[in-house]
Amino acid sequence: MAATSHHNVLIVGGGTAGITVASSLQRRQGSRGLGIAVIEPRDTHYYQPALTLVGAGVCTLSKTRRDEAQLIPDGVSWIRDSAAKFDPDNNLVSLAGGDTLTYDYLVVCTGLVLDWDKIEGARESLGANGVCSNYDPRYTQYSWEVLQSLGPDSKALFTQAPLPFKCPGAPQKMAYLSADYLRKQGIGGCDLHFLTHAPGMFAVPLFAKELVKVAARHNINVHFQHNLVAIDGPNRRATFEVAGGDKEGERVEMEFDMLHATPPQSPPEAIRSSPLANDSGYVELDQASMRHTRYSNVFGLGDAGSTPNSKTAAAVRKQSPVVVRNLLKVVDGAPLEDSYDGYASCPLTTAYGKVLMAEFCYGGKVTPTFPLDPRKERWSYWWIKATGLPFFYWHYMLKGREWFLQHNTDFIDPTL
Ligand SMILES: Cc1cc2nc3c(=O)[nH]c(=O)nc-3n(C[C@H](O)[C@H](O)[C@H](O)COP(=O)(O)OP(=O)(O)OC[C@H]3O[C@@H](n4cnc5c(N)ncnc54)[C@H](O)[C@@H]3O)c2cc1C
């Protein structure tokens, strides 16, 4: 029988953002006595930034995975269901299983869903005939298998979906690591292509310039404004639609031995169809305070939010303390602080042992954390990506501890 229960703070989504906020709120709420619950249907949590490393054979899938039950902080309730309907005028969330929850404060962080259905034939093709994707943990290990099967006459395609999608650098990271793997194996002559819906390599010009050089160094042919629309796995053919310029709308077919695909992504239907969504379907948030623009007891963060930052775990790391502090200010009746500046970071793996650390805020302003030239690929950044950040994620961020290093907002971009 359907039941109704009440929680002071209801967090929808127990991924990167949901667990971080739950832990941080539990640590910082002091004597306020708020009852916190997380709605999350999945029993497995992945550290998604390491999926790129799994696809390139540097890390195993099992190292990226934890049981959700282990991550739910002590004293926080886990509601193992999905939010199906939001009624923020009545502070109410209906669950797919039929129960109803009421709340005083709501935090929405459901992330994005992978829209494989927007690519004809993708669902049928993935996981066989060289069609792989680091974006979907079911097919990430297959990326590594396919990469190892390539020979001197092989053709490999790496695609990038229309923005926004999570970690905008991840599609090209796989292209660079694959090229470097082949070089290390002494396999020359492989025909490599990076095909992106975007008109450039990266949204921030300083990093885009460097990445053009990286692609050229790896002999990767770059095709801008090419959007993957269909996959024919058995015949190993991919179809792209030209997304701009004189040939807009034309279709181009390419053969492949390896196709690393990036799916289009969007917030879950329950968000898109709710009163919380903006016209594009994202949770409509104030970009500095992370509070909902129309519902004063609702906050949001992470990939499902409307804030115009790059959708990364690094952004969540900086958004979550703002959400927690501001939520507690609303509880206390104090004025909010506007402190999220759009920070995101994308450690671009340009080769095995090399990372270009792209860190930037709203408007593409470059904001490095370390006093080093951000245009340089470095082994130290590789160590941070492969070792430092995963450790920090599991032991500090998801435990609600804050990152003590500040990014430099006074950095002057020398290329401007
Ligand atoms: C291949 C890849 C590489 C990446 N590389 C990097 C990187 O190098 N650096 C970086 O910073 N970031 C990277 N990211 C991005 C990063 O992982 C995400 O930005 C981050 O996880 C977003 O956190 P989130 O909590 O918003 O979403 P998620 O962590 O995806 O969590 C959302 C949760 O909400 C749950 N949910 C969905 N719908 C509902 C519902 N209706 N009710 C209840 N719960 C629901 C989901 O089950 C999920 O657990 C990468 C991602 C991928 C896929």
Image: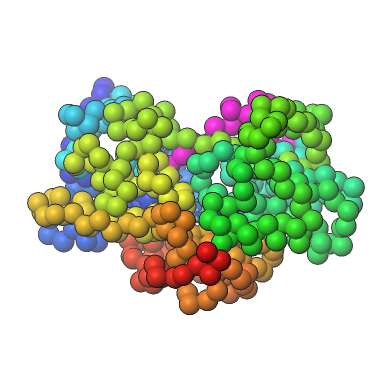
Q: Measuring 38% from the left and 50% from the top, which residue is drawn there?
A: 17
Nearest to the observer: residue 320 or residue 99: 320
Is residue 117 within the magenta segment?
yes
The stretch in magenta equals 110-128
User: Looking at the image, which residue sits at the far top?
Assistant: 1
Relative to 270, residue 293 above or below: below
Q: Is residue 205 above or below residue 402?
A: above
Quadrant including the N terminus: top left
Colouring style: rainbow
x, y percentage for residue 378?
A: 62, 72
**Of all residues shown, which one is farthest toward the bottom?**
371
Residue 408 visible in this rendered orientation of the protein: yes
**Residue 72 visible to the viewer:** no
To which quarter of the image does residue 252 belong?
top right
How many badges with numbers are in the image?
A: 0
Query: Along the horizontal axis of the image, is 262 left or right of 344?
Result: right
Q: Position of residue 260 (x, y in %)?
A: 69, 43
Task: Pinpoint residue 381: horizontal percent, then vertical percent.
Answer: 57, 70
Q: Residue placed at 59% from the left, 31% from the top? A: 116
Which sits in the foreground, 161 or 47? Answer: 161
x and y, in percent, of residue 319 in the image:
34, 55
Q: Is residue 184 left or right of residue 162?
A: right
Residue at position x 17%, y 29% from top? 90
User: Which quadrant of the structure image shows residue 54?
Assistant: bottom right
Q: Is residue 320 magenta?
A: no
At a point 21% along the width and 37% down the height, the residue shown is 295
Front-most of residues 99 and 266: 266
Q: Pick whichever, 364 or 394, lies toward us.
A: 364
